[in-house]
Amino acid sequence: MSAEPKYKTAFACAPLVYVNGDYVAAQDAKISIFDRGFLFADGVYEVTAVISGQLIDYAPHIERLKRSLRELGMDMPCSDDELEKIHRSLIEKNGIDEGLVYLQVTRGSENGRNFPFPAGAKPSLVLFAQSTELSEDPKAETGVALASVPDIRWERRDIKSVALLAQVLAKQEAKSRGAFEAVMTQDGYVTEGGSSSLGFVKADGTIVLRPFSNAILPSITRQAVTKLADQTGVAIEERLFTLDELMGASEVFMASATALVMPVVKIDDQRIGGGQPGPVVRKLRALYFEMADQQAREQSDAWS
Ligand code: PDD
């Protein structure tokens, strides 16, 4: 019998998905082979966490989606109301209590392969939902390991593009080294995780984060954490930092819609904070769930 994997990362898609106007069984969902998402990774995506059957920080995710689309000269594929309805229907139809909704918009398809934008192509819209453990995630109790890799991505990482090959390679490398996530570095500084934002806590309790720019994705979870830290009087310092500094920190954390606030206890061969999740990150994770529960309660009141 094979041993239980240390990090469970494979999540099965819920049975009902949305493709260009229809709710269909996942195995029947189809997209053209000429779709530019398939041929050129010409598209963008969002991942929104679901807690207590409700969408967490939905509005900023959709704002970021609109910005990504704008930066690539693409239109929203449907109205705001319609998009929210699709998100909610997938949660409801698939009975998702905790997990995520994945959304992808591509520039659509024409009959062939041409690099420049096709005239009049209709964007493709695909959404699906997955159940994952968030509030009871066992990784949050033990903390996770990171493996450092060079950041080989393009220069517009602020756009949430589906062109994720560099991250696929980074995360595969991390996995092969027994780590849960990659920490990517460029020009001597940490950029971010393979699919997460990274930060650390200094000895005086200040949280250090890399400033948002074209070099990293403006993480919605990190913005929520920053707000919570601010409300509880924790100072935030935004500046570049090195891998050595991260490895020498008393506490390190990842932030993303899939891991939420996740303590990091090892980077390469270096233990962080004695190899245990520390009090500041534990507290921020608890505050995050309080905030999420509050949002979920407000939405369930508004939608019932
Ligand atoms: N990734 N940085 C990168 C490169 C990311 O891919 C992500 C999220 C984040 C965190 O952003 P947010 O807090 O808005 O989820 C930072 C998603 C979850 C993914 O690709 O699965």
Image (cartoon, rainbow, N blue to C red):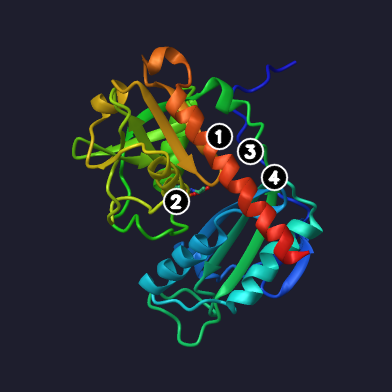
The alpha-carbon separation of the residues under discs 1 and 2 comes to 30 Å
Q: Is label 2's Cβ within 8 Å of ligand 1?
A: yes
Residue denoted by label 4 = 98
Can residue 29 be seen here? The reply is no
Between label 2 and label 4, give the one nearer the viewer: 4
Residue denoted by label 2 = 164
Label 3 element class: loop
Between label 4 and label 1, give the one nearer the viewer: 1
The alpha-carbon separation of the residues under discs 1 and 3 comes to 12 Å
Residue type indicated by callout 4: Glu
The alpha-carbon separation of the residues under discs 4 and 1 comes to 16 Å
Whether residues under marks 4 and 3 lie with C-beta atoms below 8 angstroms apart, the answer is yes
> Could you say where residue 167 lies in the image, as x and y percent from the top left?
42, 44
Please name the residue shown 38% across and 44% down the image: 230
Can residue 87 be seen here? The reply is yes
Residue type indicated by callout 2: Leu
The alpha-carbon separation of the residues under discs 2 and 4 comes to 25 Å
The alpha-carbon separation of the residues under discs 4 and 3 comes to 6 Å
Which of the two labelled residues, at mark 2 and mark 4, occupies the earlier sequence position?
4
> Could you say where residue 304 lies in the image, as x and y percent from the top left?
78, 64
Residue type indicated by callout 3: Leu
Which of the two labelled residues, at mark 4 and mark 1, occupies the earlier sequence position?
4
Instruction: Kindly indicate the quadrant of the structure image that contains residue 94.
Output: bottom right
The alpha-carbon separation of the residues under discs 3 and 2 comes to 24 Å
Farthest residue, direction left? 187
Residue type indicated by callout 1: Ala
- 66 displayed left or right of 301: left
Label 1 element class: helix
Whether residues under marks 1 and 3 lie with C-beta atoms below 8 angstroms apart, the answer is no
Whether residues under marks 4 and 1 lie with C-beta atoms below 8 angstroms apart, the answer is no
Work out whether residue 159 or residue 141 is closer to the camera in this orientation and state it.
141
Residue denoted by label 3 = 134
